[in-house]
Amino acid sequence: MRDLFSDVDINKDEAVWIAQGLRALAKCDGLAAAELAMVESLEGELGIESTAHDTFDADASPLRGEPQQAVFVRTLVLLSLVDGRVSTRETDFIVDACSRMGLSDDRRAELEVDAKQYLLSTLEGVRHFRQQAIAVGKRLGLSEAQIDEALAN
């Protein structure tokens, strides 16, 4: 997942806060093993200690700017998709986190599409199962243009 934000400088305080937020999101509707694995993987990639016993304070964001906020929101969206369904609690958590950071609903929606396109782009170049890849994009709520962009060859 690191390549999703390899072009954005994330310092240690930001990385810890992002991981804490991801854990809080994962817990908001019952922690799934896949969600936990994603958070632990990210912690390892970022070289930070486990945040398993930390609390998340959404009002204490150390994020330095919009690029770091975008990383946070994209990772929240990806985590919410890990178990195959986005619960109302997860959606509410993401909306609230964005609101607390001062991100508009339009910007949140753009970042959600970015995250979904990133996920779908892992199927880029698929030829034999292209219709199935397109169906995945539709289930993610992406438009045909967004699907085409994500699957561009």
Image: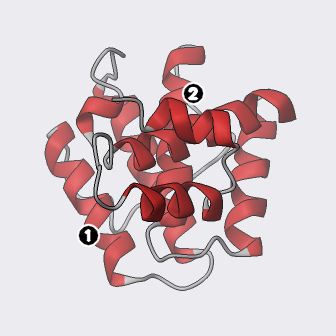
In the rendered image, the vertical position of residue 3 relative to residue 54, given as above or below: above
Residue 63 is left or right of residue 99, and the answer is left
Specify how the rendered protein is coloured.
secondary structure
- The spot of residue 10 in percent (x, y) is 34, 23
Q: CA distance from mark 1 to mark 2?
A: 22 Å
At label 1, the amino acid type is Ala
Residue 57 is left or right of residue 23, and the answer is right
Q: Which of pointers 1 and 2 lies earlier in the amino acid sequence?
A: 1
Q: Nearer the viewer, residue 93 or 49?
A: 93
Q: Nearer the viewer, residue 129 or 79?
A: 129
Residue in the picture at 33% in, 29% down: 153
> Tag on residue 104?
none
In the rendered image, the vertical position of residue 79 relative to residue 33, given as above or below: above
- The spot of residue 133 in percent (x, y) is 44, 58
> Tag on residue 69?
2
Q: Nearer the viewer, residue 108 or 28?
A: 108
Residue in the picture at 28% in, 58% down: 128
Residue under label 1:
37
Label pair 1/2, CB-CB below 8 angstroms:
no
Extreme residue toward the right, this view: 105
